[in-house]
Image: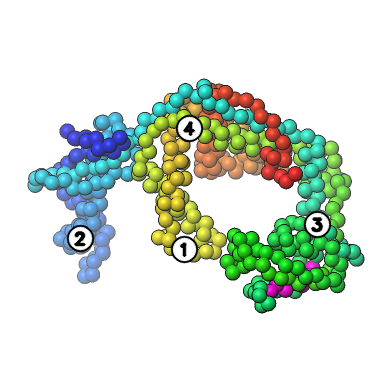
Amino acid sequence: MSQLEVLGSLERRIDLAVPIAAIDAEVETRLKRLARSVKAPGFRPGKVPMSHVSKMHGPGVKQEVLGESLQKSFFEAINAQQLKVAGMPRFEPREGADASEIRFSATFEIYPEVKLGNLAGASLKRPVVAVEDANVDATLDILRKQRRSFAKVERASQKDDMVKFDFKGTLDGEVFPGGEAQDFSTVVGEGRMLKDFEDNLVGLSAGESHGFDMTFPADYSAAHLAGKTVHFDVTMKEVQAPKLPEVDAEFAKSLGIADGDIAKLREEVKANLEREVKRRIQARLKEAAMEVLLANAVLDLPKSLVGLEIERLRNQMLDQIQASGGQIKEDRISADIFKDQAERRVRLGLIIADIVEKNDLAAKPEQVRALIDEYAQGYEDPQEVVQWYYQDPQRLQELEALALEDNVVAWVAGRVQATDEPVKFDDLMGRAA
């Protein structure tokens, strides 16, 4: 009978034993199977003596069988105890073994009990946003700007002009690295350069020069310039004014409206905006609902799950650094920087899993299909998008997770004091006023 010991709120230890005879029998069976194909110098394949096979592969096979036996014995024991293990167990040999068995102990954590308080006193604000004609007009202006052309003009530069110029920057009288260029181009006001620099490009005609001092931000990426005041000399070479396309049939056709109907274009833009508004509102609701759950739930965190999440976050950062062409050693990234984020994610994951299980909130196939149909509407061939999702189980799992989260958000919203909160369209979309 397995002995279970309580070491802490979540930590447990169980003592188990595996018969040596069973281990040896399985090792012999696997070595005989291996002997049919094993190769060794001086012997034909399949004719290598068992003594040789055992010498070459016996230790590895025995280690493999022992590991599998420990795992099997462990999971049989915890299933008998009706325990739900969090993370992986830590196996250690146990003293007092006799010749007939291998004794060991497995230390592990169990999933915590989640205690969720009464949510009736909690509050949640539901953003309410209406898509109006002015929002459609603004979006069409953005689309026009994305398709603009530029033409040379004989006047002083203005905001939104494309300008070509030479510049030279000096620090303490010396040109600093990266501080000089010829025939450099930028669009004034787009923020590709520091604002103080761009502001000094306004009002210059081709052939005119201008000198000015500028202080780099204290947090500027180039450490040798951060917080330093430098002098720039700029010579304007060319000014080009933007020309935006008219909202006409050709413009509509360029955006996928086959017959060039402007009314259809506006309807499609509005529908796309409404879909995006819905997504952003749901994202805000989700964030607010998750904060409500975190604030009202009490549970212990399994250290093993937090450790696994920290490792996942660290690997994710390493992958991102490598994908961008950077190089960094794994040991240079401290696990401590991920601790708070990992704990939050694990805590929230456990709370959500508990709520889903207790309230039957798992995603239904029809919910997943509704999400797919909604996403597909933004594409030229919706059916192709639907097929794309259903061709890959992983893609479906991602949408199932989203549908499940939507169910949890709705469950929370139905138990708290939820009130509508009017929000400006530009604020929701993150657009500057």
Task: Say if mark 1 contacts mark 2, CB within 8 Å.
Answer: no
Going from N to C along the chain, the mark reached first, 3 or 4, is 3
Mark 4 vs mark 2: in front: 4
Q: Which x, y percent locates residue 248?
A: 87, 46
Q: Residues within 10 Å of mark 4 (few under 14, many from 20)?
A: few
Nearer to me, 322 or 386: 322
Residue, far right:
154
The residue pinned by badge 4 equals: 295
Residue 167 drawn in magenta: yes
Going from N to C along the chain, the mark reached first, 3 or 2, is 2
- For the C terminus, give its image quadrant: top right
Is 222 on the left-hand or right-hand side of 102? right
What whole-number distance in Å separates the C-alpha atoms at marks 3 and 4? 47 Å
Task: Say if mark 3 contacts mark 2, CB within 8 Å.
Answer: no
The residue pinned by badge 3 equals: 160
Question: What's the magenta region?
Answer: 164-170
Q: Which x, y percent locates residue 17?
A: 17, 41
What whole-number distance in Å separates the C-alpha atoms at marks 4 and 2? 61 Å
Residue 96 drawn in magenta: no
* Image point (19%, 44%), residue name: 104
Going from N to C along the chain, the mark reached first, 1 or 2, is 2
The residue pinned by badge 1 equals: 328
Mark 1 vs mark 2: in front: 1
Q: Residues within 10 Å of mark 1 (few under 14, many from 20)?
A: few
What whole-number distance in Å separates the C-alpha atoms at marks 3 and 1? 40 Å
Q: Amino acid at mark 1?
A: Ile
Mark 3 vs mark 1: in front: 3
Task: Say if mark 3 contacts mark 4, CB within 8 Å.
Answer: no
Is 390 on the left-hand or right-hand side of 295? right
The residue pinned by badge 2 equals: 53
